[in-house]
Image (spheres, rainbow, N blue to C red):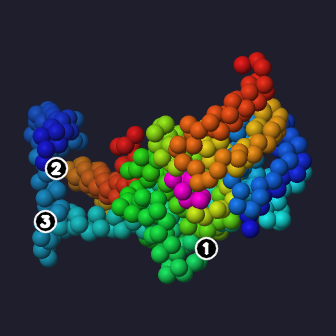
Amino acid sequence: MTSSRVRRWLLAIVLPIAAVGLWQAAGTDGSLAGGALPTPDRVWRAWVTWAFGHAGPMTLSPYVGTWAEAVGHSAERVAKGFAVAILLGVPLGVLIGWSRLVSAMVDPSIQWLRPVPITAWLPISLAIFGIRDFGAIFLITIGAFYPIVINTTQGARDVEKNWIRAALMMGAKPFDILRRVILPAALPSIFTGLRIGLGIGWTAVIVAEMVAVKSGLGYVLWDAYYVGRMDIVIADMVSIGLFGFLSDWAIVRLEMWALNWRRLQSFNQ
Amino acid sequence: MGTIQFSSVGKTYPGGVLALENVNFTVGEGEFVALLGPSGCGKSTLLNLIAGFERLSDGQMSFNGQGVTKPGPDRGVVFQEASLLPWLNVWENVVFGPKVQGMPRNIYEPRAQEILRVMGLEKFHKSLPVQLSGGMRQRVGIARALVMQPKALLMDEPFGALDAQTRLSMQELLLDIWQSLKTTVLFVTHDIDEAILLADRVCVMTARPGRITRDIRIDIPRPRSINTLTSGDFTTYKAMIMAEMRGLHPHH
């Protein structure tokens, strides 16, 4: 690690450490706000038990050694819903950006449906899919779909005219133009859409699990609140933040790899 | 085969802007014709029409006796800023055309290698366009047109963005290539020297509306080189064309 990277890391953790320190110092008897908010050391111990505890035959608490399972359920749903959103949003966005006809036919409907928040889709999702995985995945797909399709459309519309002309001159058919010119040219915008979409996907999975399924970080969050386990609630929130952050980081790495030509471009100009 | 014909061609853009009016001219088989004029005179529009990028509003045009409706590999276009696909490396840019046309690999690969060698790019197959200088990029732009063995090359101010020295070496390279290929070339430029040095005929254009005012045959013997630029013939043609262009713009 270079010294500038160390410096950046240090600067980045100043605020969290200060906040946790203050929070710890403000608590008396392991809690503050009249017992509603446990201090960080309690949250930490709750998390350790939740993550690594061994449930014996007499264990009644569901928060012993079940953390990885909860994370796994949520991450799997986000991955599935996000994948469906990409499979729908990217091709559709490329088509809307490329064809005036498709744009005139599809774009208005997308714009009318977009203001409906994912929470408003909950009742319909429950009515159709019941308390099952599918409902959660449906909500994640809807949430992630809009930013992906809109950013892809934008990217496909902004493709430099001469790239398309050059490809046509070289004998490219419409499908070649879509796949070999418009799609790669729109990739920077597509990645912007993916990052926003994935963020919304994590929001959607928590909302869906609070209501529509009986597992995952969102379910634990609501359940722990009902039984007054605020330490688990906070550990759960931190977990959501951590995995949201990690999945975003993975997309950024993928973007850096896929758009190497673009990084060189900003470097050379 | 590679004749270009414009008869009574007009082009009006939406909003009523008259870009070209009553343009008549022909480029014969194997002929090198330069379209010379100030910016906004419609010379690039003329090239875009025969390339199939734009539709004409009036008159007729043909390529090899056939009407032009869309772009195609029989007319290789070299763009002003090369317009290479920035995510593909030099090799991938050059074989893009043969590949999408479904040409067999064993035919296009040796051909692409040979053209890249002639262009002085054999060490740059793996480079991305952004890693190349403007002149090198334009070499790739020419290579990707030539690899399709087009019947005509349509060049839209290909050296306009290059520095003077690079421009000279690119002009010399183009003279060499043309000398051996004898492809039909339509070359758009605003540089008088460039037009005289390269072309068999210089068509002088005027703006608003765009039309061709003079069609001047350049009888300087070939092969030509940079030295042509300092010959007596060259100076005579230059004086003639400058007078022609000044006459067209009495207000400037």
- Furthest-top residue in this view: B251
Give the residue number, with chain letter if any, for mark 2: A43
User: What residue is at 35 percent from the left and 61 percent from the top?
Assistant: B123
Task: Give me the chain letter of mark 2.
Answer: A
| Residue B19 is inside the magenta segment | no
- Magenta segment boundaries in residue numbering: B173-179
Q: Position of residue A30 (x, y in %)?
A: 11, 42
The residue closer to the viewer here, B188 or A8, is B188
- Furthest-front residue in this view: B232
The amino acid marked with disc number 3 is Phe
Circle 1 packing at 10 Å, graded few (<14), some (14-19), many (20+), is some
**With A67 as the anchor, is A258 left or right in this view?**
right
Checking the image for residue A52, the label placed there is 3
Dot 3: what SS? helix
Give the residue number, with chain letter if any, for mark 1: B101
Q: Is residue B198 visible?
A: yes
Asked if labels 3 and 1 touch by Cβ distance under 8 angstroms, the answer is no
User: What residue is at 47 percent from the left and 51 percent from the top?
Assistant: B137
The quadrant in which residue A180 appears is bottom right
The residue closer to the viewer here, A151 or A28, is A151
The residue closer to the viewer here, B30 or A115, is B30
